């Protein structure tokens, strides 16, 4: 590597969060990078794409990242839990952040930090010859420093087991954000789908409080209806909506709007007698 004036692309999400603003994200299940463009043009701060539940391959992820960069919008990749390579590849493709699902304990969180943060926070393997390092055009130690400050990790707290060490997880150097996932949490407490369950309400408040107390950010999923409540609680990264939900609503409404329309051809057409 050699010294240049090239800088790593700054994170829009981190800039807003550090300024005390609230970040609006939306989730994608579809693979087409054009969906990223549409969401980016709509004004979202961040796109959340997925490799945990969605059969996206690395070429899909790369195209989605390139589309987000074209519009100056951050993109996070929820990774599949595998080797350290599964965690760092999205970052090397120049995703702005990664989301790690089902962080179950302090030791689990510590391993994530070790694998995804550079010295002095962790021991992430160094390359620098990829998009995030400007293809070896950012000086070695500068690349490490920029990656630690302009790229972020999101640790998903979506199991009751993680609550035993929540405050310790939130206080560990190198954790940027903890993210409450109520869906899996409801299953973990034996109340699948009961989003108004008292244990979910308690966990949601405790996660936001732990993040605020330890000086990191709190994220979760939300809706237009509970946005203000979540912000008041301390959540500054909120994901609303998803591409598949939007398309489903659109096509359902379009089909329902056709109710009462004539859906058979008039008699006598096409030579009928």
Image (cartoon, helix red, strand yellow):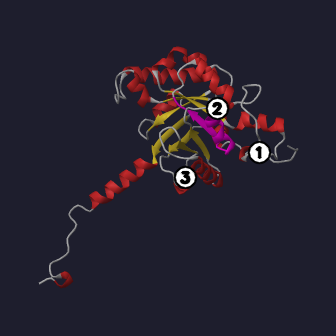
Q: CA distance from mark 1 to mark 2?
A: 18 Å
| Element marked by disc 2 | helix
- Which image quadrant for residue 212? top right
Q: Which residue is mark 2?
A: 84
Q: Is residue 99 magenta?
A: yes
Q: Viewer-nearest of labels 3 and 1?
A: 1
> What numbered label is drawn on residue 36?
3
Specify the quadrant of the image occupied by residue 268.
bottom left
Instruction: Tell me the quarter of the picture where residue 67 sits.
Output: bottom right
| Image point (55%, 15%), residue name | 165
| Number of numbered markers | 3
Residue named by callout 1: 129
Q: Residue furthest left?
A: 273
Q: Nearer the viewer, residue 95 or 259?
A: 95
Give the quadrant of the N terminus.
top right
Judge whether residue 272 is colored magenta: no
Magenta highlight range: 84-101
Residue 37 placement, left or right of 138: left
Where residue 4 appears, x then y in whole percent?
Answer: 86, 47
Evaluate if marks 3 and 1 touch, with contact meaning CB atoms under 8 Å apart: no
CA distance separating discs 3 and 1: 25 Å
Q: What is the crowding at mark 2: few (fewer than 14 residues within 10 Å), some, or many (at least 20)?
A: some
Give x and y (percent) for residue 9.
72, 46
Q: Earlier in the sequence, mark 3 or mark 1?
A: 3
Report the front residue among 115 and 34: 115
Q: Earlier in the sequence, mark 2 or mark 3?
A: 3
Q: Is residue 262 visible?
A: no
- At x 73%, y 46%, the residue is 130
């Amino acid at each position: 590597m050699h010294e240049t004036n090239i800088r790593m692309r700054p994170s829009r999400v981190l800039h807003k969060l550090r300024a005390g603003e609230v970040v609006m994200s939306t989730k994608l299940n579809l693979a087409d990078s054009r969906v990223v463009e549409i969401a980016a043009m709509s004004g979202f701060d961040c796109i959340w794409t997925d490799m945990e539940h969605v059969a996206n391959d690395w070429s899909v992820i790369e195209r989605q990242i390139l589309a987000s960069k074209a519009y100056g919008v951050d993109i996070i990749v929820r990774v599949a839990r595998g080797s350290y390579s599964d965690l760092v590849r999205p970052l090397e493709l120049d995703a702005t952040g990664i989301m790690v699902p089902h962080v179950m304990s302090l030791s689990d969180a510590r391993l994530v930090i070790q694998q995804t943060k550079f010295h002095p926070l962790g021991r992430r393997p160094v390359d620098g010859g990829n998009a995030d390092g400007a293809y070896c055009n950012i000086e070695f130690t500068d690349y490490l420093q920029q990656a630690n400050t302009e790229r972020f990790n999101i640790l998903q707290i979506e199991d009751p087991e993680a609550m035993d060490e929540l405050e310790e997880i939130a206080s560990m150097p190198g954790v940027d954000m903890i993210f409450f996932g109520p869906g899996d949490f409801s299953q973990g407490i034996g109340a699948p789908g009961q989003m108004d369950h008292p244990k979910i309400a308690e966990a949601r408040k405790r996660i936001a409080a732990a993040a605020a107390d330890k000086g990191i950010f709190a994220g979760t999923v939300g809706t237009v209806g509970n946005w203000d409540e979540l912000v008041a609680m301390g959540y500054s990264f909120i994901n609303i909506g998803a591409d598949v939900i939007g398309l489903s609503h659109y096509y359902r409404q379009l089909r329902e709007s056709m109710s009462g329309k004539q859906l058979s051809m008039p008699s006598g057409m096409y030579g009928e007698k």
